Image: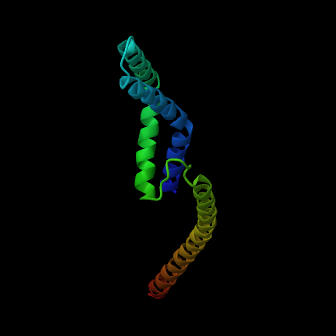
Amino acid sequence: MKTLDEHIRQSGIYKAHRGKKAQYEKLYAQFEALEKETGFGAKRKVQKALDAAKDFRETYCSEISAFEEAERYLKKVMQGHFDPKKLPPVKTWQSEQAKLIADRGKLNQQYIAIKSEISEAEQICKSVYSIMRQEQRQPHRALEIGR
């Protein structure tokens, strides 16, 4: 269940921040396209585009880093079945998680029932041992009284 929780959490991060990553990539692509241009004012346009990309990266650094970390995690987890254009199978994971939670509830009820049965059996054993000790003591008392 912890694994599924982590899968769902990472896919949520991936979904939430992929727009910021796409915007940054778009700004950087504009910079690269301008970098190939020559002519009057080309260097200034290039520098302006680079500054815009850097500013955006600095502003949204934590979101972009979280997205990249989530993307690496999901690629590792899904082992080749990860498509960056599609979202991970979150609904499948959530249904599996719900099933595991239901199973855990059933097992917990069984555990509680068995635990109470064991408690009753231990109480019966204690009572039996107590009765046996009392019976062992009574014949000795009878002998002492007879003397």
Q: How is the image coloured?
A: rainbow
The x, y position of residue 13, in whole percent, is 52, 40
Tell me where residue 127 sits by quadrant. bottom right
Q: Foreground: 134 or 31?
A: 31
Tally the marks. 0
54 vs 112, left or right, is: left
Q: Foreground: 35 or 93?
A: 35
Residue 128 to residue 8: above or below: below
| Outermost residue toward the front in this view | 39
Residue 105 to residue 54: above or below: below
Residue under the image location 44 percent in, 18 percent down: 52
Q: Foreground: 13 or 24?
A: 24
Residue under the image location 53 percent in, 74 percent down: 122
The x, y position of residue 19, in whole percent, is 54, 34
The x, y position of residue 53, in whole percent, is 43, 23
Residue under the image location 41 percent in, 23 percent down: 34
The x, y position of residue 54, in whole percent, is 40, 21
Location of the C terminus by quadrant is bottom left
Residue 64 to residue 15: above or below: above
14 vs 55, left or right, is: right
Residue under the image location 59 percent in, 67 percent down: 107
